[in-house]
Amino acid sequence: MSGQALKVRTPRTRRGNACEYYSGNPPLLLAVNRQDIAVADDGSFQYLGGETPIHPDREEEIVDLAVRAMNVLGCQGYAGIDVIAGDHIYVVDVNPRPTTSLVGIAAVMEEEIADILIRASHGEAPADVHLSGRVRFDKDGRIARV
């Protein structure tokens, strides 16, 4: 299963995203990631990129909620589930497609991402994936190891 956690620049709120692949078998978590979001003077939001993998204190809750959202919505294939974590965790968006975070996940995944996605689409996904290191990625897909 994959999950992402996003960071909104406010003192009490964190925005997160869980990225998973679902094909009728239990979802395959790829990673939990943080996304950096800026708030402009006019109140609009701007996606800046993120970091993966991360392991927030509430990682299990984030992943469990993401899996429930995928099941309720009937998601199939790759999906990124965006959440905001404060006093409670809320799903704020579901992206049923690869997102920019996949560039970061692929950079730290020991397995070949294309092979995983193809195998998963045939119901042959591995039980888990192996991540090595951590990276930051920007909205244009540039990667930097951290």
Image: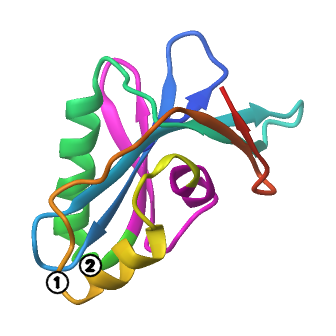
Image quadrant holding the N terminus, namely bottom left
- Identify which residue is drawn at 58% across, 51% down: 107
**Local crowd size for mark 2, using a 10 Å CA cut-off: few (<14), some (14–19), many (≥20):** many
Q: In the drawing, what numbered circle is on residue 120?
A: 2
Question: Horizontally, is 26 left or right of 17 in the view?
Answer: left
Of 1 and 87, the residue lying toward us: 1
The answer to the question of whether label 2 and label 1 lie on touching residues, with beta carbons closer than 8 A, is yes
Q: Which residue is mark 1?
A: 123
Identify the element where label 1 is drawn. loop
Question: Horizontally, is 126 left or right of 25 in the view?
Answer: right
Q: Which corner quadrant of the image does residue 20 belong to? A: bottom left
- Identify which residue is drawn at 55% across, 33% down: 134
101, above or below 13, in the image: below
Q: Position of residue 54 (x, y in %)?
A: 45, 29
- Identify which residue is drawn at 40% across, 67% down: 79
Mark 2 to mark 1: distance in Å?
A: 5 Å
Within the magenta stretch, is there residue 92?
Answer: yes
Image quadrant holding the C terminus, namely top right
39, above or below 94, in the image: above
Number of on-image labels = 2
Q: Position of residue 39 (x, y in %)?
A: 77, 32
Q: Position of residue 67 (x, y in %)?
A: 20, 55
99, above or below 5, in the image: below
Q: Which corner quadrant of the image does residue 103 belong to? A: bottom right
Q: Which residues are magenta?
A: 79-106
Within the magenta stretch, is there residue 81?
Answer: yes
Q: Amino acid at mark 2?
A: Ala
Residue at the extreme top: 11
Q: Position of residue 131 (x, y in %)?
A: 40, 43
Of 81 and 139, the residue lying toward us: 139
**Local crowd size for mark 1, using a 10 Å CA cut-off: few (<14), some (14–19), many (≥20):** some
